[in-house]
Image: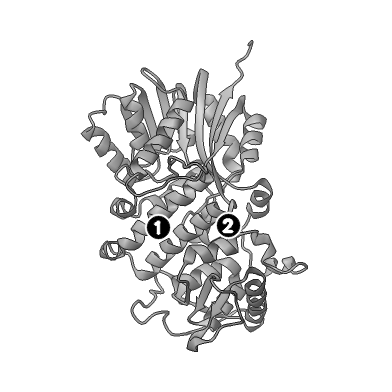
Amino acid sequence: MTTTTALPASTPSAPVDPSRWPDVARVPNVPLRAAAAARVLRRVAARRGLRVDLPGGRTLQPAPPGAPVLRLHRPRAFLHRVGESGLIGFGESYQAGEWDSPDLVALLTELATAPHTLVPPGTQWLRRLYVQRPPAAEVPTARNARRNVHRHYDLSNDLFALFLDRTMTYSSAIFPTGPDGAPLATRDGLPAAQHRKIDRLLDLAAVGPGTRLLEIGTGWGELALRAAARGARVVSLTLSEEQLALARRRIADAGHTDRVQVRLCDYRAAEGRYDAVVSVEMIEAVGRPFWPRYFATLDRVLAPGGRVALQAITMPHERMLASSSTYTWILKYVFPGGQIPSLRAIEETAARHTRLRVTHADTWGPHYAQTLRLWRERFAEHSPEVAALGFDEVFRRMWELYLAYSEAGFRTGYLDVHQVLLTREEAGR
């Protein structure tokens, strides 16, 4: 049985508001599960070579020099949270200030490497004690999707402007590469890298003068602007009112209102026929049950001879299947209703439900790790401005963890990002 014990606030400087963060303010009392979590922590630290620092200058056990550090400020609260809800509790414990690390990305990268090996063999059944299914209110139906989008993308345009570059592009960039193939990522080079990504997608979709282009997922309008500059006529769909307002303003300022329409519209309600469809990191919000409808929509609106260019965050197929019904910390706090596909799932869903076929795919995972690094560094530098916008310390720690966790996922290959071209074999050809 789970009971609740009232414990002191996580940090004297920033007490947790229980009305805003009920599950962060609440510390569970689950002694047996906490004891099991302590055994798992000791095993993970030994197998992964982590240093676990405890209050009073103690360490959990010896660790090699240079080991990633998990610094526990309140071990009891940490163990009870992890014991009750696994990785959700791990994230909530960070939000509460109960643990940190001098190099958060290094720690999370180690934990994200082969994550299925963290729990001892023979004890996987214990996951049933804490793994939850996503709540019905967050399943991205036509009714719920707008609310899911609102919770993330309508936080504040000013917030996103603090850590994105001047293009206001919130997806992986593509950087130049060095002789070893590694991305050469610098902050000054981020706008050009975002344009390189956008231009590559527009090239995949063969967007040029006179192209009728549908964009599903407007963002803040940069792709639509570059397509209009090529002479295309663009219809762009979004469910974010904040993005809608700023994208329209940017398009007007650039003098492209005659070429670009931005509509507040669900992808399922898309109308018209288009020579090209482009969608950048939007499929992750569609949800696995609705992937057939998403691809059917692409097929329905695509004119004969048309091309679809997608940019999608992906994960290995077996990991996708294993996690597709699991409620995670990211889903609870950052991207409600989301589901990351695999490249295989994209290929199979399109082939099973439409006439579209994947004809080309490129992978850019290391570039996303570097993009996230630049965003994370800017977010940390602008922490006072984030606070001035009204976001409390729990929120700021939540975003620190989200950006670092995502970066670690791409560094390890647990996550990837693909640019995919889909074309249609026309009847009679």
Q: Residue at x 54, y 53 (%)?
A: 411
Q: How many marks?
A: 2
Q: Residue at x 34, y 34 (%)?
A: 262
Q: Which mark is residue 376?
A: 1
Q: Quadrant of the N terminus?
A: bottom right
In the rendered view, does 162 fall on the left or right side of 328?
left
In the rendered view, does 335 fall on the left or right side of 319?
left
- In percent of width and height, residue 308 lies at 51, 28
- In percent of width and height, residue 99 lies at 48, 75
Q: Nearer the viewer, residue 311 or 271?
A: 311
Q: Residues within 10 Å of mark 2 (few under 14, many from 20)?
A: some
Helix, strand or loop for disc 2: loop
Q: Which mark is residue 134?
A: 2
Q: Quadrant of the C terminus?
A: top right
Outermost residue on the right side: it is 122
In the rendered view, does 64 fall on the left or right side of 98?
right
Q: Which mark is residue 45?
A: none
Helix, strand or loop for disc 1: helix
Q: Quadrant of residue 29?
A: bottom right
- In percent of width and height, residue 111 lies at 59, 64
Please name the amino acid that badge 1 sits on: Arg
Q: Nearer the viewer, residue 105 or 359?
A: 105
What's the coloring here?
Answer: one colour
Q: Nearer the viewer, residue 297 or 189?
A: 189
Q: Is residue 27 visible?
A: yes
